[in-house]
C-alpha cells in the first residue's frame, strides 16, 4: 500500500489554486471516478460516470478546474461536498456524521491532517479532529465491473463516550439527473417501481422494520428524464445492510444533487467508549446508460465474489404449498418419489417439523424434531430423498419465537423488549435477541446439530415479522437492532464455517430481506411468497435491478395461486419461473400424469439453458405496450439469447408491434426460433415467422433495430424465443 503523493497539480493558467488540488482517478468496467485527495480535507467525489479515458496531470487538473466550487451566496471560500458531508465545510444539507458527547460537544467536527492511501482501485482516507476527539476513515473502491462502493468509520480517540446518531456516505450525481426511480411494496407484492421528479429538498426512504423490508427502495436511482432499460444515464445507490437503513436523494439550490445512504440508528444504539469505532455498511453505487447496464454492474460484482455459487443451481422442490403443516410421512415420501421423476435435484422440508408446531402460533424456537409427528426422526424422509438422488434442505426461523413455546417459557429474558413490557405480537411471534450470547449459542448448537445429524445441504432461513420496540435485555432494554443484525450475520457466517458446502436462503415473509449485506452470508433469496406468475413478472423484473437470476428463487406454483386465488396454465407458470433459480412449490403427487409429464419437459428445458441463465446478461427490452413484459438473458459473448415475452394484460391496440433485442453482434447472423413445450404446433396466418418451422434468420443489427414480432398471445400467457448465433 502506497501513500498518495501530496504534491499539488500545476495550475495550467498559473492562477491561484483552491482546495482539492490533488486527485485520484479510478477506472474500471467502463466507469471513471475522480476523487479529491488533498491533505487538508476528507475526500470528495468530483466525477462519477462514463469512462473518461487516460488522464494525465494536466487533464486531471482541467477536470478539477471545470468542477471547482463556486460562490453561491453562502461561505466566502466554497468547499466541495465530502463523501461524508461536514457542516464545517459550509455544507447546509444533512451532515454525514451526527453525534455528540454527554456535555453536547463534538457535534460538528472538522477533520484535518488527512492521510490518503491507494491500493489498486481503493482509496482509503483518514482524518482527525483533536478537539472533538474523533477520527474518520472513508474507504472508496471501484470494482472490476465498475461498481462503486464506499463506507465510513468513526473512531472515538477521547476518554469520554461519544454517541453516534448517524453516519452516512454520499455519492454525487450531475445536474442532468431529473428523475428518481425506486421501489416499494408489501407482503406478496414486493419491488413495485415508483417514479417522480427530483425537486429541491430530500426524497428520503427509511426502513425502521429491523429488516430490509418488502417496501425497501432496493436501488434508489437518479437519472436523465425518461430513462429506460436501454437508454438514459442513470446513477443508483443500494445500502448493503439487513437492519434499519436509509437512502435518499438530496437536491440543494446551490446545484448539488446527492445520493446518500447508510444504517438508520435508533437512539443510543451506538455509544462509543474510548478507542471504540463504528463502521457503516457498504453503500453501493452503480452507473449505467439504461437500467440494464446499471443492473449488469451489480450482477458482475456479485458473480466475482469467491463465495458466489458456480456449480449448477439445483432444481428445488419446496413442500410448503403442497402440505403446509400436515406432515404425513407417506405423503412426503410420495412427493420425494414424484419430485425425482420430474427432475428435481433438491427437496426442502418447510415449516412444521419441530416440536409443538401444528400451526403457526406455537413451537417457534423449539428446534427439536417433533417426536409425535416424526417418531423415527427425519431419517426415513432424508434417506428416501438421498436414494432418489436429491439433496435435502430444511426450514428454520431462528430469529423469532412463539410465546407459546418451551423456549419462551424458559427464557423470557431472551425476547427483545423495552420499558418493562413485551412488544405487540405479530404473527403470534416475538423476536429472539440473538445478540445475547446464550441465545446465540443455543441457536448455533441446535441448528448445527441438525445439519450434522441429517447432513443437511440447504437451509431456508425465514424471518416473518418486523422488529417492533427491539430492546435488548442485555442492555437494560436499550435499542438493539444494530447488534441484532450484526449477531445474525455472525451466526450465518459461523454456520457456513462449520459446515462447508451448506447453502442458506434468505427468506423474510418472502422478499423482505433482499440486500447485499445478507448475501455476504447466504446463497440465494426468496423473491416473494407470491408465486402467482402474473405478480411474479413484476417482482422478478425489478429484483433483477440488484440480483442476477441464479440468486433468486423462482418456483413453479400449483394451478391455483395460494396468495391470489388466480388460476393459470402450467405454461405461463413455468415460463415465468424459468429464468431464475428454478423450483417447484406444488403438490405434484396430486397432479395428473399429463401435468407431471409437461412439468418434466419444463424442468428439462431449464436444465438445457441453465448455464446461459446463470451466467448471462439480463436484458429487459423496452416493450411498445405496458401490457407486454419482455425479459431474458444474453450470453456474455453474444452467441445466444433466451427471450421471454409475456402478455400480462390486454393491450390497448393489437398487435403491440415488435420487440427489439439489444446487445447482439451487429454483423453476425442469428436464428430465432420458438422453444418450450408450449411452442406453436399449429401455424396460422397470425403466427410470427420466428415461431414457424425453421424459425427466422436475421443479423444482430436487424434484431436490435427492427426486432421480432410479438405473438398473438392470450392474456396471462407467454412465449419463449431462442436466438442462436450462426
Image (spheres, rainbow, N blue to C red):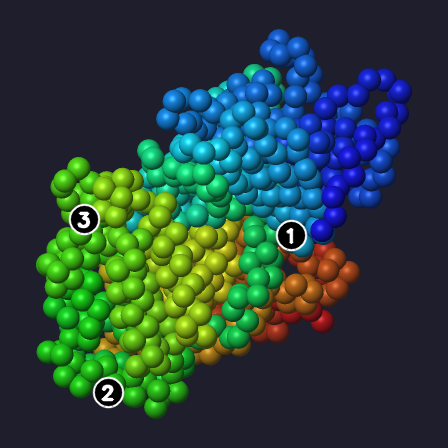
> Considering only vertical position in the picture, is 89 above or below 432?
above
Q: Position of residue 400 (x, y in %)?
A: 23, 56
Q: Is residue 545 visible?
A: yes
Q: Position of residue 73 (x, y in %)?
A: 62, 9
Nearer to us in this view, 203 or 16: 16
Q: Which corner quadrant of the image does residue 318 belong to?
A: bottom left
Answer with left or right where residue 194 lies relative to residue 35: left
**Disc 3/disc 2 C-alpha distance (Å):** 34 Å
Nearer to us in this view, 304 or 649: 304
Q: Determine which residue is flagged by label 2.
A: 380
Q: Are marks 3 and 2 in contact (CB under 8 Å)?
A: no
Q: Determine which residue is flagged by label 1.
A: 143
Q: Are marks 2 and 1 in contact (CB under 8 Å)?
A: no
Identity of the residue drawn at 23% across and 78% down: 590
Q: Which part of the image, by quadrant, shows the C terminus?
A: bottom right
Nearer to us in this view, 45 or 147: 45
In the rendering, which numbered label is found on residue 426?
3
Identity of the residue drawn at 52% across and 46% down: 282
**Disc 2/disc 1 C-alpha distance (Å):** 48 Å
Identity of the residue drawn at 37% across and 61% down: 491
Answer with left or right where residue 62 lies relative to residue 718: right
> Considering only vertical position in the picture, is 511 above or below 94?
below
Answer with left or right where residue 379 lies relative to residue 609: left
**Disc 1/disc 3 C-alpha distance (Å):** 41 Å
Amino acid at each position: 500500500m502506497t501513500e498518495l503523493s501530496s504534491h499539488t497539480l500545476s495550475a495550467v493558467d498559473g492562477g491561484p489554486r483552491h482546495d482539492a488540488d490533488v486527485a485520484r482517478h479510478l477506472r474500471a468496467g467502463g466507469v471513471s471516478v475522480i476523487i479529491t485527495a488533498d491533505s487538508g480535507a476528507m475526500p470528495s467525489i468530483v466525477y462519477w460516470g462514463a469512462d473518461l479515458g487516460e488522464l494525465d496531470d494536466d487533464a486531471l487538473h482541467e477536470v478539477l478546474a471545470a468542477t471547482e466550487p463556486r460562490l453561491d451566496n453562502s461561505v466566502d471560500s466554497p468547499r466541495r461536498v465530502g463523501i461524508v458531508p461536514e457542516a464545517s465545510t459550509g455544507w447546509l444539507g444533512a451532515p454525514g456524521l451526527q453525534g455528540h458527547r454527554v456535555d453536547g460537544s463534538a457535534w460538528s467536527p472538522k477533520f484535518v491532517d488527512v492521510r490518503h492511501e491507494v491500493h489498486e482501485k481503493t482509496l482509503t482516507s483518514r482524518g482527525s479532529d483533536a478537539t472533538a476527539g474523533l477520527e474518520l476513515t472513508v474507504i472508496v473502491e471501484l470494482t472490476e465491473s465498475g461498481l462503486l462502493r464506499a463506507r465510513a468509520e468513526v473512531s472515538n480517540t477521547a476518554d469520554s463516550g461519544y454517541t453516534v446518531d448517524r453516519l452516512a456516505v454520499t455519492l454525487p450525481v450531475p445536474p442532468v439527473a431529473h428523475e428518481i426511480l425506486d421501489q416499494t411494496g408489501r407482503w406478496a407484492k414486493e419491488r413495485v417501481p415508483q417514479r417522480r421528479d427530483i425537486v429541491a429538498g430530500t426524497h428520503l426512504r427509511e426502513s425502521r422494520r429491523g429488516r430490509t423490508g418488502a417496501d425497501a427502495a432496493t436501488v434508489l436511482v437518479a437519472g436523465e428524464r425518461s430513462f429506460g432499460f436501454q437508454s438514459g444515464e442513470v446513477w443508483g445507490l443500494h445500502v448493503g445492510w439487513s437492519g434499519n437503513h436509509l437512502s435518499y436523494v438530496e437536491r440543494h439550490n446551490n446545484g448539488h444533487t446527492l445520493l446518500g445512504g447508510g444504517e438508520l440508528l435508533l437512539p443510543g444504539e451506538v455509544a462509543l467508549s474510548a478507542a471504540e469505532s463504528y463502521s457503516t455498511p457498504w453503500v453501493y453505487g452503480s452507473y449505467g446508460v439504461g437500467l440494464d447496464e446499471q443492473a449488469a454492474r451489480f450482477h458482475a460484482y456479485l458473480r466475482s465474489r469467491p463465495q458466489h455459487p458456480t456449480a449448477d443451481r439445483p432444481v428445488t422442490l419446496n413442500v410448503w404449498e403442497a402440505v403446509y403443516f400436515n406432515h404425513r410421512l407417506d405423503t412426503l415420501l410420495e412427493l420425494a418419489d414424484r419430485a425425482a421423476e420430474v427432475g428435481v435435484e433438491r427437496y426442502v422440508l418447510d415449516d412444521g417439523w419441530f416440536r409443538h408446531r401444528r400451526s403457526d402460533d406455537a413451537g417457534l424456537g423449539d428446534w427439536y424434531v417433533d417426536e409425535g409427528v416424526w417418531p423415527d426422526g427425519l431419517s426415513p424422509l432424508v434417506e428416501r430423498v438421498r436414494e432418489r438422488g436429491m439433496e435435502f434442505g430444511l426450514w428454520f426461523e431462528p430469529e423469532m419465537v412463539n410465546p407459546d413455546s418451551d423456549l419462551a417459557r424458559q427464557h423470557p429474558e431472551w425476547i427483545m423488549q423495552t420499558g418493562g413490557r413485551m412488544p405487540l405480537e405479530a404473527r403470534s411471534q416475538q423476536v429472539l435477541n440473538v445478540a445475547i450470547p446464550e441465545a446465540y449459542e443455543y441457536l448455533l448448537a441446535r441448528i448445527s446439530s441438525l445439519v450434522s445429524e441429517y447432513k443437511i445441504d440447504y437451509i431456508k432461513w425465514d424471518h416473518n415479522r418486523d422488529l417492533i420496540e427491539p430492546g435488548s435485555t442485555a442492555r437494560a432494554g436499550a435499542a438493539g437492532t444494530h447488534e441484532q443484525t450484526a449477531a445474525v450475520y455472525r451466526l450465518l457466517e459461523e454456520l457456513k464455517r462449520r459446515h462447508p458446502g451448506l447453502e442458506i436462503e434468505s427468506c423474510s415473509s418472502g422478499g423482505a430481506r433482499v440486500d447485499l449485506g445478507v448475501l455476504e452470508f447466504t446463497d440465494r433469496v426468496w423473491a416473494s411468497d407470491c408465486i402467482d406468475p402474473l405478480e411474479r413478472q413484476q417482482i422478478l423484473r425489478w429484483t433483477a435491478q440488484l440480483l442476477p437470476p441464479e440468486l433468486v428463487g423462482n418456483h413453479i406454483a400449483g394451478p391455483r395461486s395460494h396468495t391470489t386465488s388466480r388460476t393459470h396454465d402450467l405454461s405461463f407458470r413455468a415460463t415465468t419461473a424459468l429464468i431464475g433459480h428454478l423450483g417447484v412449490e406444488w403438490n405434484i403427487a396430486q397432479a395428473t400424469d399429463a401435468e407431471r409429464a409437461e412439468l418434466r419437459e419444463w424442468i428439462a428445458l431449464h436444465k438445457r439453458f441453465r448455464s446461459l441463465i446463470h451466467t448471462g446478461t439480463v436484458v429487459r427490452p423496452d416493450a411498445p405496450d405496458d401490457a407486454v413484459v419482455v425479459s431474458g438473458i444474453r450470453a456474455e459473448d453474444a452467441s445466444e439469447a433466451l427471450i421471454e415475452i409475456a402478455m400480462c394484460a390486454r393491450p390497448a391496440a393489437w398487435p403491440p408491434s415488435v420487440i427489439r433485442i439489444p446487445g447482439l453482434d451487429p454483423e453476425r447472423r442469428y436464428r430465432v426460433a420458438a422453444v418450450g413445450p408450449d411452442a406453436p404446433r399449429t401455424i396460422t396466418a397470425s403466427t410470427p415467422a420466428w415461431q414457424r418451422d425453421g424459425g427466422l434468420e436475421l443479423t444482430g443489427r436487424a434484431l436490435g433495430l427492427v426486432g421480432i414480432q410479438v405473438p398473438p398471445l392470450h392474456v396471462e400467457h407467454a412465449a419463449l424465443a431462442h436466438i442462436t448465433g450462426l
